[in-house]
Amino acid sequence: MRLLFEIDKKDYNKNGTSFVRPSVRGIIIKDGKIAMVHSLKYDYYKFPGGGIKAGEEHRETLLREVKEETGLRVCPDSVKEYGLVHRIQKGMKEDMFIQDNYYYFCDAENDVEEQELDDYEAEEKFTLEFVTPQYAIDVNKTSISIVAEQVNEVYSIMLERDSRILEILMEEGYC
């Protein structure tokens, strides 16, 4: 999969402990708008997706995570590779947080089912919204400092990462 970009904060002890958490993210585009998870509590947008469990294939994780966070059922045969973002920074508990984020284009069925949110996702009031890429970018840019202050720096990097992905999608003419 092509490397879209790397985020290396260089704010960690590379000889210390590390936490490695690869993840997958779904890019679902309908009528020029993208399916995004909106945190109503902190007012930011992120691509639906999450961590890959041990022994789980990327496609399997993508279908599970998109369904849990949005209620959308991904059409398995529609999944196509888009790109990878490699991220390294100081972790919340460990010295280093290392994450490869694998982005996939996919289609979803029209029906939206009930979400299956984790506790923190429910607390943040994760909500599925189809928005224009520019709108999500604008919201994230105003929320980055608030999220860094109220949640943590790791989250604010997530907003920067997904905003950059949205910018690349626009530059490449996907939306």
Image (cartoon, rainbow, N blue to C red):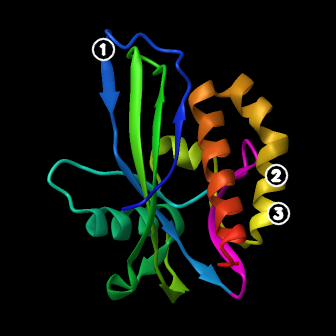
Mark 3 vs mark 1, CA separation in Å: 38 Å
The image quadrant of residue 112 is bottom right
Q: Provide the residue span drawn in magenta.
A: 31-45
Circle 1 or circle 2, nearest the eye:
1
The answer to which of marks 3 and 1 sits earlier in the sequence is 1
Nearer to me, 43 or 16? 16
The residue to which callout 3 is attached is 135
Residue 22 on image: x %, y %: 34, 45
Give the answer, above or below, for where 22 lies relative to 62: above
**Callout 2 amino acid:** Val
Q: Is residue 10 left or right of residue 150?
A: left
- Badge 2: few (under 14), some or many (20 or more) residues near its Cα, within 10 Å? some
Give the answer, above or below, for where 80 lies relative to 167: below
Q: Secondary structure at mark 3?
A: helix
The answer to which of marks 1 and 2 sits earlier in the sequence is 1
Give the answer, above or below, for where 80 lies relative to 169: below
Residue 89 on image: x %, y %: 49, 25
